[in-house]
Image (cartoon, helix red, strand yellow):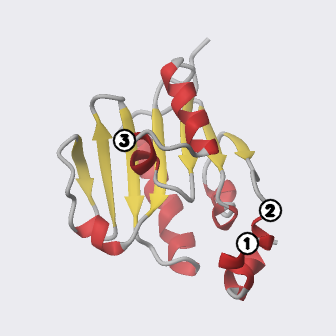
Amino acid sequence: MERKSLVMVSPHNWYDHVKPNRINRPLKFVEQYYNETIFKKVIIVNRLHPKRIINIQDNERKLVERGVMYNLLFDKTREVYYLEHCFPFGKVENYFLPFIINRIIKKIGLSNIVLWICDPKSVYLFKGIKGLKIFDAYDDWSLSPLFQKRTRHLKYIN
C-alpha cells in the first residue's frame, strides 16, 4: 500500500519551532510523524509576515520556487517542504492559496494526500484540495483575546 503525503496547514511556523526545539502541539505531531516515516512526503503551509517572504535569511533550506507572495522551500536535513505565503487573510487568500497548493502538489509529486488543518481560518481549503481531510481544533480560538476584537476572523473561527 502506498504511503500517504501530508499537507499540514498550521497557524504556526513549523520551521521556527523545530529549529530551536520549541514545543507546539500540532507541529510536534508532524515532527513525530516525519521522524517515524509515516508519510512519504510532508509539506507545511504557513502564513508569514511579508518581510519574511521577501527576505529569506536561511541557508539551511533550498528555495525551490519563488512566487509573487509565496516561497516554496525544501529542508534537505528533514526532507520537508515549506510553502510560506503572505496572502492577506480573506478573499485573496481563499482564491489563490488552493490553486497554488494544488499546483505544488503536482510539481513535487505528492499523492494520497492527507490535508490536516489546525488553523480555523484555513478550513476553506477543504473545498479546494482533494484527499483525506482532518481538522484539529486543539484550542477554542473563539475565546482567544487575539480574536475577540477581530470580528472578521471570529466569524470564520465560529
The reply, left or right, for residue 50 in relation to residue 110 is: left
The reply, left or right, for residue 105 in relation to residue 57 is: right
Residue 62 quadrant:
top left
Tell me residue 61's x, y (percent).
Answer: 25, 42
Looking at the image, which is closer to me, 139 or 107? 139
**As drawn, 64 above or below 143:** above
Spatial CA distance of label 1 from label 3 is 27 Å
Determine whether the residue tagged by mark 2 lies in a helix, strand or loop: loop
In the image, what residue occupies the spot 57% across and 16% down? 2
Tell me residue 120's x, y (percent).
Answer: 70, 63
Few, some or many residues within 10 Å of mark 1 (<14, 14–19, 20+): few
Location of mark 3 (residue): 19
Quadrant of the rendering where the N terminus is positioned: top right
Which badge, 1 or 3, is on the more N-terminal residue? 3
Location of mark 1 (residue): 144
Few, some or many residues within 10 Å of mark 3 (<14, 14–19, 20+): few
Tell me residue 78's x, y (percent).
Answer: 36, 29
Spatial CA distance of label 3 from label 2 is 27 Å
Spatial CA distance of label 1 from label 2 is 7 Å
